[in-house]
Image (tube, rainbow, N blue to C red):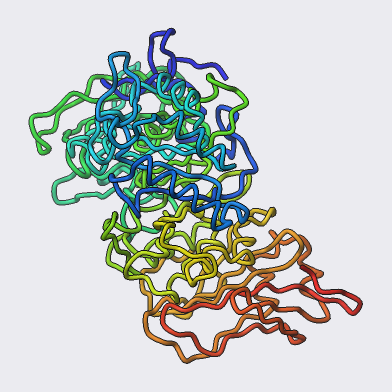
Amino acid sequence: MAKVNVFSQDPANAWVTSREKPAVITDSEYMFPAFSNGEVLLNKKHGRLPAMGWNSWNPFGSANTEALTKAIADAIVDLDLDDIGYKYVVLDDGCYKSTRDSEGRLSNSAIKFPSGFKTLGEYIHDKGLKFGMYNDIGTNLCAGDAVGTAGYEDVDTRTYKEWGVDFLKIDNCYYLWDNATYSNRSNAQYVYAPRIRAITISGNDGFTQTFNAVSHGVLTGSGAVKNSSEDYVNYIGTKDGTNVGQTPVGELWSELRFNVTAPADGEYSLVINYASGAENGTGRWLQAAVGEVDSETRYYDDFLHTTSSTSTFIDSDAITIRLNAGKNIIRLMNHRRQENTLQSYAALLNGLNKCDPDHDIVLSICEWGKTQPQNWGYKIGNSWRILNDITFSVGANGSAAWESNNTASIASQYNKAVVMDEFAGLDKGWNDADMLVIGMSGITNTMSKSHMSMWCILNSPLMLGLDLRTVQKGDDIWNIIANEDVIALNQDKLGVQAKRIYSSILTSAPDTTYTENNNRVDILAKPLANGDVALTFVNMSQSADLNSYSVRVDDIVSFIGAKMINSDEFKNAAGYIVKDLWTKEISFNTDGIFAVGSLGGCDSVTVRISPMNDNDNIKK
């Protein structure tokens, strides 16, 4: 693929992002219309199963050290967790020297990591494990250190390669082109289009026509608003997915369209009456295109001039566009929230490719669902976080929760992930519901068991977030995180995320309907590579549910049959072998109805169902 002015204009620094202005995008594969084409970029590797390992953030926060990391690597091996699949030891925030060296390179905190990261990586590799590190696509890390990758992608990827890094978790705290967590709130100017009041189209032979945004404009997608009383449209952009309350399914962006009938083929002048700002809903960046999304010609992609206030409307400079005789569609939009973020993560992947085209580094996108990465993350990443953090209380006195009114809970993460199955797969990557909080204060063994089942059946990466020095082989925590039958669902080679096929509070579309109401029981079904099906029944309430819940074979096949190895064999089996993956009990079923009697608060049952014909043996 030609690298045509996607990033820096300096050929010597191609693909290094600017800290002065968003990228100039000329390659259509990096533009919004290409998000739905299913094609990966920069030779991103397919076929990876969800990563398994340990991350330092939840147990240690910014207080992680070389000694602690070595102790955790030792514990992974001593507890036989490496044999079960936990391979990646990932250093999160708080590990670097707070500024770059004189050559612009990253370096280790001399106090916390005195031997350096290359030596630490060798220690981890000598254990048969893999070494992971952390950074941010902005200017700073979330904890504040001024060593973000923006503008240093080429330098940093060479450094990571030299250090022997196998996994990169890349955050989004101080991103320059979005109002990210710690970024300047005025960065909303990049995220939203200006307020639009009208457009005027002019051409030869005196043709001039003005279209009012409220009365003539058509809003597509979702999010944009017609303000009839003040006669303008705003909130043209992409919805922020960082927090709860926003479904991840559907069109999460908006455009303003005008149907224009031109008298003849030719060039026309497009003038936009607008008011700009730098606040939520009103920005300065505008994209203008002619044609439907899949066949557009984009004519403008930049700032409009600043207006004196968000209520002062002026006319833009004329934009030359080409129209055909007859009906045309003019689209005003701002898809830069997604396009910019894709560019920045792509710069890292490109840098890794330049260092070693055969590298096997996992790229974990961590922009917390802000730019709806389920739509574009598959192009360059192996997984993408779907919400902000599962807990904000980390370190020695850290804690977690089953449910909350923000993202900081097991239920909050699950509620979003459970309707995102169609975005995941071996050909795409994985919805990352954040690190496991098993072993943290506030989480009971029952919650932990359900948490583990949910993350496994949903194919979320399994990154442990506890101090493994406190775990003993065979204790309650070890038995949960080392349950090979449950982990096998997450690592099943078919690589299909479970689909919710029933929810006790939903009357239709349980697989795509987002809900935050936890007073319910869900049933999830996941097809497996040998033709089996896994089911999880989970009570999302913290109170017991004494009702019985069941699902029939026909229901299972109707939802996931197209993704099963042999749905007919499963549907028409003479009977079924049912293994409870926690109690290890095996039972036989001949009526094709799978049920649970009652479930305690936060409790769950996960079973593996094997179809059995008359002469079948038990399938493992």
Q: Is residue 197 visible?
A: no
**Up-down relation of residue 19 to residue 593 (above or below):** above
Quarter of the image where the C terminus is located: bottom right
Q: How many marks?
A: 0
Residue nearer the viewer, 505 or 434: 434
Q: What residue lies at 44% left-to-right and 23% top-to-bottom?
A: 159
Q: Is residue 142 visible?
A: yes
**Up-down relation of residue 477 to residue 574 (above or below):** above
Q: Quarter of the image holding residue 153? A: top left
Q: Quarter of the image holding residue 338? A: top left
Residue nearer the viewer, 380 or 50: 50
Tell whether 193 sits left or right of 610: left
Q: Position of residue 568 (x, y in %)?
A: 80, 69
**Up-down relation of residue 111 to residue 546 (above or below):** above
Q: Position of residue 48 (x, y in %)?
A: 61, 44
Tell whether 312 sits left or right of 433: left
Q: Quarter of the image holding residue 575? A: bottom right
Q: Position of residue 565 (x, y in %)?
A: 76, 60
Quarter of the image where the N terminus is located: top right
Pick out the residue farthest to the right: 615
Tell whether 34 sits left or right of 229: right
Q: What residue lies at 31% left-to-right and 58% top-to-bottom?
A: 391
Q: Position of residue 604 (x, y in %)?
A: 51, 77
Residue nearer the viewer, 24 or 62: 62
